[in-house]
Amino acid sequence: EADIYQTPRYLVIGTGKKITLECSQTMGHDKMYWYQQDPGMELHLIHYSYGVNSTEKGDLSSESTVSRIRTEHFPLTLESARPSHTSQYLCASRSGRNTEAFFGQGTRLTVV
Amino acid sequence: GENVEQHPSTLSVQEGDSAVIKCTYSDSASNYFPWYKQELGKRPQLIIDIRSNVGEKKDQRIAVTLNKTAKHFSLHITETQPEDSAVYFCAASHPTGGGNKLTFGTGTQLKVEL
Protein backbone atom coordinates (compact mmCIF):
# COMPACT_ATOMS: atom_id res chain seq x y z
CA GLU A 1 0.00 0.00 0.00
CA ALA A 2 1.35 3.43 -0.95
CA ASP A 3 2.12 5.33 2.22
CA ILE A 4 4.82 7.15 4.15
CA TYR A 5 6.54 5.24 6.93
CA GLN A 6 8.55 6.41 9.89
CA THR A 7 10.67 4.32 12.23
CA PRO A 8 10.99 4.03 15.09
CA ARG A 9 7.62 5.21 16.43
CA TYR A 10 9.04 5.80 19.91
CA LEU A 11 12.64 6.25 21.00
CA VAL A 12 14.22 6.95 24.38
CA ILE A 13 17.91 7.70 24.18
CA GLY A 14 20.68 9.06 26.37
CA THR A 15 22.29 12.47 26.00
CA GLY A 16 25.18 12.55 23.55
CA LYS A 17 24.05 9.59 21.48
CA LYS A 18 23.84 9.71 17.70
CA ILE A 19 20.47 8.77 16.24
CA THR A 20 18.87 8.50 12.82
CA LEU A 21 15.14 8.79 12.29
CA GLU A 22 13.98 6.95 9.21
CA CYS A 23 11.38 8.11 6.71
CA SER A 24 10.39 6.28 3.55
CA GLN A 25 7.55 6.82 1.11
CA THR A 26 6.29 4.52 -1.61
CA MET A 27 4.33 7.15 -3.54
CA GLY A 28 7.15 8.34 -5.79
CA HIS A 29 6.95 11.88 -4.42
CA ASP A 30 9.76 14.33 -5.18
CA LYS A 31 9.18 16.69 -2.26
CA MET A 32 9.79 15.60 1.30
CA TYR A 33 9.74 17.49 4.59
CA TRP A 34 10.67 17.10 8.24
CA TYR A 35 8.64 18.90 10.90
CA GLN A 36 9.17 19.11 14.65
CA GLN A 37 6.00 19.21 16.75
CA ASP A 38 5.35 19.22 20.46
CA PRO A 39 1.99 17.46 21.14
CA GLY A 40 -0.90 19.45 19.68
CA MET A 41 1.34 22.39 19.00
CA GLU A 42 2.73 24.20 15.96
CA LEU A 43 4.47 22.30 13.15
CA HIS A 44 7.97 23.70 12.68
CA LEU A 45 9.71 23.00 9.37
CA ILE A 46 13.29 21.90 10.02
CA HIS A 47 14.37 20.42 6.65
CA TYR A 48 12.98 19.87 3.19
CA SER A 49 14.01 18.36 -0.11
CA TYR A 50 12.66 18.77 -3.64
CA GLY A 51 14.49 15.85 -5.16
CA VAL A 52 17.47 13.53 -5.01
CA ASN A 53 20.63 15.25 -3.80
CA SER A 54 18.78 18.44 -2.86
CA THR A 55 18.20 19.45 0.75
CA GLU A 56 17.41 22.77 2.40
CA LYS A 57 17.14 23.99 5.96
CA GLY A 58 13.73 25.02 7.17
CA ASP A 59 12.56 27.88 9.33
CA LEU A 60 13.42 26.37 12.71
CA SER A 61 17.08 26.20 13.57
CA SER A 62 18.00 22.59 14.07
CA GLU A 63 21.16 20.70 14.95
CA SER A 64 20.03 17.81 12.78
CA THR A 65 21.12 16.91 9.25
CA VAL A 66 19.33 15.14 6.41
CA SER A 67 20.23 13.35 3.21
CA ARG A 68 18.33 12.44 0.04
CA ILE A 69 20.24 9.82 -1.88
CA ARG A 70 17.12 8.00 -3.08
CA THR A 71 13.73 9.44 -3.96
CA GLU A 72 11.90 7.32 -1.44
CA HIS A 73 14.21 7.81 1.53
CA PHE A 74 14.77 10.95 3.65
CA PRO A 75 16.51 10.16 6.95
CA LEU A 76 17.17 12.71 9.69
CA THR A 77 20.27 12.42 11.89
CA LEU A 78 21.11 13.95 15.24
CA GLU A 79 24.87 13.67 15.84
CA SER A 80 24.61 14.31 19.58
CA ALA A 81 21.18 14.14 21.17
CA ARG A 82 20.27 16.58 23.94
CA PRO A 83 17.18 16.86 26.20
CA SER A 84 16.11 19.94 24.18
CA HIS A 85 15.63 17.59 21.21
CA THR A 86 12.79 15.83 23.00
CA SER A 87 9.79 16.22 20.70
CA GLN A 88 7.77 14.53 17.98
CA TYR A 89 9.27 14.47 14.48
CA LEU A 90 6.90 14.21 11.53
CA CYS A 91 7.96 13.38 7.99
CA ALA A 92 5.79 14.40 5.02
CA SER A 93 5.88 14.09 1.25
CA ARG A 94 4.01 15.39 -1.78
CA SER A 95 4.24 15.18 -5.54
CA GLY A 96 3.95 18.84 -6.53
CA ARG A 97 3.82 22.39 -5.27
CA ASN A 98 0.02 22.57 -5.24
CA THR A 99 -0.76 19.12 -3.98
CA GLU A 100 -1.64 17.42 -0.73
CA ALA A 101 1.17 16.58 1.68
CA PHE A 102 0.95 13.16 3.31
CA PHE A 103 2.34 12.69 6.80
CA GLY A 104 3.96 9.72 8.45
CA GLN A 105 2.89 8.49 11.90
CA GLY A 106 5.76 10.37 13.52
CA THR A 107 8.65 9.48 15.82
CA ARG A 108 8.29 10.50 19.42
CA LEU A 109 11.81 11.13 20.70
CA THR A 110 12.77 11.45 24.36
CA VAL A 111 16.34 12.33 25.30
CA VAL A 112 17.22 11.64 28.92
CA GLY B 1 10.18 33.94 4.15
CA GLU B 2 6.52 33.09 4.56
CA ASN B 3 4.74 33.72 7.85
CA VAL B 4 1.32 32.20 8.53
CA GLU B 5 -0.74 33.47 11.44
CA GLN B 6 -3.78 31.55 12.69
CA HIS B 7 -6.62 32.58 15.02
CA PRO B 8 -8.06 31.68 17.41
CA SER B 9 -5.74 29.29 19.21
CA THR B 10 -8.68 27.64 20.96
CA LEU B 11 -12.34 27.52 19.98
CA SER B 12 -15.23 25.98 21.86
CA VAL B 13 -18.66 25.63 20.22
CA GLN B 14 -21.89 23.85 20.94
CA GLU B 15 -22.81 20.87 18.81
CA GLY B 16 -24.66 22.05 15.73
CA ASP B 17 -23.12 25.52 15.74
CA SER B 18 -20.67 26.79 13.14
CA ALA B 19 -16.93 27.23 13.66
CA VAL B 20 -14.66 29.64 11.81
CA ILE B 21 -10.86 29.64 11.85
CA LYS B 22 -8.88 32.40 10.17
CA CYS B 23 -5.37 32.56 8.75
CA THR B 24 -3.25 35.26 7.18
CA TYR B 25 -0.09 34.86 5.13
CA SER B 26 2.68 37.26 4.20
CA ASP B 27 4.17 36.04 0.89
CA SER B 28 2.10 37.07 -2.13
CA ALA B 29 3.79 34.26 -4.11
CA SER B 30 2.01 31.63 -2.01
CA ASN B 31 -0.42 29.82 -4.27
CA TYR B 32 -1.81 26.77 -2.44
CA PHE B 33 -3.58 26.73 0.92
CA PRO B 34 -4.43 23.41 2.58
CA TRP B 35 -6.17 22.77 5.88
CA TYR B 36 -5.22 19.82 8.06
CA LYS B 37 -7.01 18.14 10.95
CA GLN B 38 -4.98 16.39 13.63
CA GLU B 39 -6.73 14.20 16.14
CA LEU B 40 -5.06 13.39 19.43
CA GLY B 41 -2.09 11.09 18.92
CA LYS B 42 -2.57 10.90 15.15
CA ARG B 43 -0.92 12.39 12.12
CA PRO B 44 -2.27 15.51 10.38
CA GLN B 45 -4.65 14.74 7.52
CA LEU B 46 -5.88 17.00 4.75
CA ILE B 47 -9.54 18.00 4.99
CA ILE B 48 -9.77 20.64 2.27
CA ASP B 49 -7.50 22.81 0.15
CA ILE B 50 -7.77 25.80 -2.16
CA ARG B 51 -5.61 27.13 -4.94
CA SER B 52 -4.90 30.79 -5.57
CA ASN B 53 -7.07 30.98 -8.68
CA VAL B 54 -10.20 30.08 -6.69
CA GLY B 55 -12.06 32.19 -4.14
CA GLU B 56 -14.14 29.55 -2.41
CA LYS B 57 -14.42 25.78 -2.17
CA LYS B 58 -16.94 23.62 -0.36
CA ASP B 59 -17.06 19.96 0.62
CA GLN B 60 -20.18 18.98 2.53
CA ARG B 61 -19.99 20.71 5.95
CA ILE B 62 -16.57 22.23 5.30
CA ALA B 63 -15.76 25.31 3.23
CA VAL B 64 -12.68 27.43 2.67
CA THR B 65 -12.56 31.02 1.40
CA LEU B 66 -9.52 32.86 0.06
CA ASN B 67 -8.98 36.60 -0.28
CA LYS B 68 -5.74 37.06 -2.20
CA THR B 69 -5.78 40.82 -1.98
CA ALA B 70 -5.99 40.77 1.80
CA LYS B 71 -3.82 37.62 2.04
CA HIS B 72 -6.17 35.75 4.27
CA PHE B 73 -8.13 32.51 4.11
CA SER B 74 -10.67 30.93 6.40
CA LEU B 75 -12.08 27.53 7.28
CA HIS B 76 -15.79 27.24 7.95
CA ILE B 77 -17.34 24.16 9.57
CA THR B 78 -21.13 24.07 9.76
CA GLU B 79 -23.33 21.82 11.90
CA THR B 80 -20.40 20.84 14.08
CA GLN B 81 -20.29 17.37 15.61
CA PRO B 82 -18.26 15.95 18.51
CA GLU B 83 -15.99 14.13 16.04
CA ASP B 84 -14.94 17.52 14.66
CA SER B 85 -13.02 18.09 17.91
CA ALA B 86 -9.33 18.20 16.99
CA VAL B 87 -6.47 20.59 16.25
CA TYR B 88 -6.77 22.32 12.87
CA PHE B 89 -3.81 23.74 10.97
CA CYS B 90 -3.80 26.04 7.99
CA ALA B 91 -0.79 26.15 5.68
CA ALA B 92 0.60 28.07 2.73
CA SER B 93 2.73 26.64 -0.05
CA HIS B 94 5.19 29.02 -1.63
CA PRO B 95 8.02 28.70 -4.14
CA THR B 96 11.56 29.03 -2.89
CA GLY B 97 14.65 28.38 -4.95
CA GLY B 98 14.17 25.08 -6.71
CA GLY B 99 11.40 23.80 -4.52
CA ASN B 100 8.38 24.62 -2.43
CA LYS B 101 8.06 25.16 1.27
CA LEU B 102 4.91 24.32 3.15
CA THR B 103 4.54 26.63 6.14
CA PHE B 104 1.92 25.92 8.80
CA GLY B 105 -0.05 28.17 11.09
CA THR B 106 0.11 27.75 14.85
CA GLY B 107 -3.01 25.58 15.08
CA THR B 108 -6.51 25.90 16.53
CA GLN B 109 -7.81 23.52 19.19
CA LEU B 110 -11.50 23.05 18.36
CA LYS B 111 -13.77 21.56 21.01
CA VAL B 112 -17.35 20.69 20.15
CA GLU B 113 -19.44 20.37 23.27
CA LEU B 114 -22.63 18.36 23.60
Image: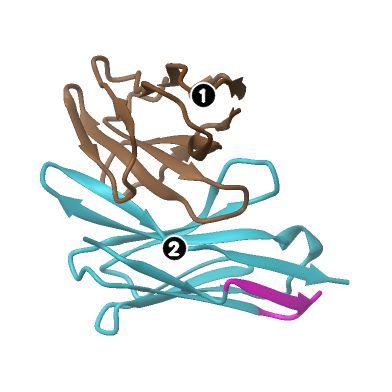
Chain colours: A brown, B cyan
Pinpoint residue B45: horizontal percent, then vertical percent. Answer: 55, 47
Q: Position of residue B44 (x, y in %)?
A: 55, 46
- Find the residue positioned furthest to the left: B97
Q: Is residue A104 visible?
A: yes
Q: Quadrant of residue B28?
A: bottom left
Chain containing mark 2? B
Element type where label 1 sits in the image: loop
Q: CA distance from mark 2 to mark 1?
A: 31 Å
Asked if residue B16 is among those painted magenta in the image, a careful observer would answer: yes
Q: Secondary structure at mark 2?
A: loop
Do the residues at pointers 2 and 1 share their chain?
Answer: no
Camera-side residue: B48 or B106? B106
Residue type pointed to by label 2 = Gly
> What's drawn in magenta, residue-wise?
B9-18
Is A54 drawn above or below residue A47 in the view shown?
Answer: above
Local crowd at mark 2 within 10 Å, few (<14), some, or many (≥20)? many
Q: Nearer the viewer, residue A66 or B65?
A: A66
Q: Which residue is mark 1?
A: A15
Q: Residue at x 77, y 58 (%)?
A: B83
Residue B66 visible? The answer is: no
Q: Position of residue A105 (x, y in %)?
A: 58, 32
Crowd around label 1: few <14 · some 14–19 · many ≥20 (10 Å): some
Question: Which residue is at the far right?
Answer: B114
Q: Is A38 situated left or right of B40 in this image?
A: left
Are the residues tagged 2 and 1 within 8 Å (C-beta)? no
User: Residue A90: which disc?
Assistant: none
Q: Quadrant of residue B76?
A: bottom right
> Disc 1 residue type?
Thr
Tag on residue B105?
A: 2
The percent position of residue B5, horizontal first and vertical second, equals: 41, 71
Query: Does residue B113 belong to the magenta stretch?
Result: no
